Amino acid sequence: MLAALMRSRARLEELYLRVIASADDVADEVGARDVAAWLIAQQRVESPAAHAALRLARELEARPVVRARLAQGRFSLEHARVILRGLEDLPDDLDPEILAQAEVTLCDLAREHRPKDLRRLASHLLAVVAPDVAEAAEAAAIQRLEETANAKATLSITDQGDGTTRIHGIVPEVVGHRLRTYLQAYTQPRVAALEADGRVQPRSRLLAHAFAQLLENTDPTRLPAHGGDATTVVVTMTLDQLRAGLGVAWLDDGTPISTGETRRLACTAGIIPAVLGGNSEPLDLGRTRRLFTPTQRKALALRDKHCRAEGCTVPAPWCDAHHDQPWSHGGHTNLAHGSLLCGHHHRRGHDPTYETTRLPDGRYRFQRRAGFADRLTEAQGAR
């Protein structure tokens, strides 16, 4: 019964479109521009749907095999749309006999495949019906697709005013694939997706955190020169704030970040910390040699195997190299004073609201400090 209803639906839709394609006289009677305008004015059809129906009706008029098969209920209207698009994407100078063969081939395939699968098959149709011209045509089609994708590319970065930035972009597919591959390297294994309370983080949040890690691990010395120097990020804070772990620091564009976040970034990112004295005079301009070298990272991975936080098993490739003693307190960038921490525990290690304890076996234990949040609020209010 259900299959019979679906076939009847396909037949009725073909009849509806066939009438639309030949109903110009109906539009003329009321002075409408075309049947789509008549549908909008007289039948209260939404404008996009009316124009889409008229366009589809005219396309079916030019494809008698597709229209006949649809009228027989052999496939759905959605299949017919996919077939029409597949035929439209073929080269304009294709031999008419080959084009007719392509139409029959797609109609036959529609009996056995869903629209989604048929769309994929249609993209390789020429290799089936005309393999001798398929390679050149496919190369030209790919080139046109890439040119169109590059023309559509756009990226906007907008501060939201609430501590977040909205990034919206449309990029060529190859760029999206590369970015997805890079981010996936930071979102495995599954244990990395767990919150502190054991809940699983949303995939979108994992990708956002992975994007931040990707930027932090990008070598600034390999970026294009900007103003005469390799691109860097300058973070400014006072010496008292740095020592106390209270207050805020500022990026070179005026964006505030916590001193704890500054310390965390100093372990992995190529930033320059500008520490100011009482008269706002620079006391120290750190250098990116604070960062662990690739060789040191490999040695830490061989030694630690995984995150050194108590109970955490995130493996070494997805961990950050962490200074046991922060650079702001005289810490050294060497194996004896370095350990691996996953992104979650690395943030805890530089979060002043948590107390960090080094256990006898070298693991870290983190415990929230009682009353620290109140002291932080008081310190910020006194500024």
Image (cartoon, rainbow, N blue to C red):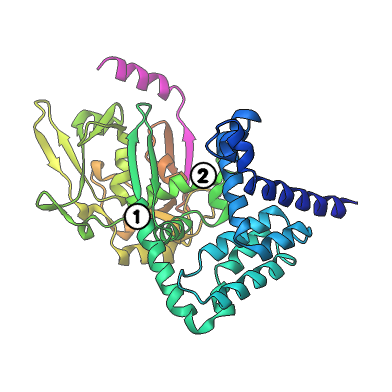
**The C terminus sits in image quarter:** top left
Q: Answer with left or right where residue 213 lies relative to residue 96.
A: left
Q: Secondary structure at mark 2?
A: helix
Structural distance between the alpha carbons of marks 2 and 1: 31 Å
Q: Which mark is residue 330?
A: none
Which is more foreground, mark 2 or mark 1?
2
Query: Can residue 79 be seen from the camera position used here?
Result: yes
Q: Residue at x 23, y 55 (%)?
A: 220
380 falls in the magenta region: yes
Q: Which mark is residue 338?
A: 1
Expressed as whole percent of the image width and height from the top left, the position of residue 223 reads 22, 57
Expressed as whole percent of the image width and height from the top left, the position of residue 74 reads 77, 61
The amino acid type found where label 2 is placed reads Ser
Q: Answer with left or right where residue 307 lies relative to residue 228.
A: right
Q: Which residues are magenta?
A: 364-383
Label 1: how many residues lie within 10 Å, few (<14), some (14-19) or many (20+)? many
Expressed as whole percent of the image width and height from the top left, the position of residue 71 reads 75, 57
Q: Quadrant of residue 183?
A: bottom left
Q: Residue at x 52, y 48 (%)?
A: 310
Q: Secondary structure at mark 1?
A: strand
Expressed as whole percent of the image width and height from the top left, the position of residue 8 reads 82, 51
- Most distant residue in the bottom direction: 132
Residue beneath disc 2: 204
Closest to the observer, 135 or 28: 28
Q: Residue at x 39, y 46 (%)?
A: 169
